[in-house]
Image (spheres, rainbow, N blue to C red):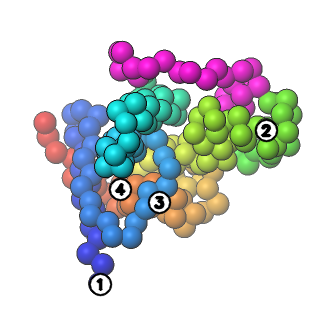
Amino acid sequence: MSQEWVSYRRSARMPVEVMRAHFEHHRYDLHAALASALRGVHDALVGGESALAQDEALHSAVRAMVRLGAVTAAPPGWAPETRREDEGLRQVRELLHEHFAEDIGTARLTEISGRSRFALYRAFRDLHGLTPGEYQRQLRVRHARRLLESGSSPAQAAVESGFADQSHLTRWFRRYYALTPARFRDAARDQAWAS
């Protein structure tokens, strides 16, 4: 029998969240969260890779978090972005941010980027660490999370974030955060600690 568990709390006064968990089977989906940055460092250290690999894993994760809006800016002294975003990729990224809740077809993205589908996916993934579809899904999950934090129901958050229904949101939310949307909303509302 699995002994997996999750405990989630957030500060009522500061933008700080604490999640403690024990997983035997759950695997996080690739997503922009501080946990993934720390996991990259952990994997680099445990895997016996060089300090350069450790440093690059952490810097890549922070750059991805900045791009997705998980943090507003990289800390001072962090490595600058080594790849440049050309106009086509910038327009694709902006379209995904502006219309994340809509179904955006591949044909529209390829037209905007001036690339073939495969060239677009490869260039976007090289720059952002995610395909355009994965990037858009993360924007949707993050929007749903904000709605849940403000007290919206999971069904309402799903619809407003572009998911087909509540079960679709639940499936992705669990993959990203190891919690159901309802449990996250309740924890965000009821388990905030004063600090």
**Number of marks:** 4
Q: Which three-letter amino acid code belongs to the residue tagged 1?
A: Met
What residue did someone put label 3 on?
175
Question: Pointer 4: what residue?
Answer: 184
- Could you tell me the amino acid type at mark 4? Phe
Q: Nearer the viewer, mark 2 or mark 3?
A: 2
> Which of the two discs, 2 and 1, sits closer to the camera?
2
Label 3: element kind: helix
Q: Residue at x 49, y 55 (%)?
A: 29
Mark 4 vs mark 3: which is more N-terminal? Answer: 3
**Nearer the observer, disc 4 or disc 1?**
1
Image: magenta residue range: 74-98
Q: Which residue is mark 2?
A: 119
Q: Residue at x 71, y 40 (%)?
A: 122
Residue carrying label 1: 1
Inspect the image, locate mark 3, and give the three-letter code of the amino acid beneath it.
Arg
Residues at marks 2 and 1, CA–CA distance in whole angstroms: 45 Å
Quadrant (top left, top right, bottom left, bottom right) of the C terminus:
top left
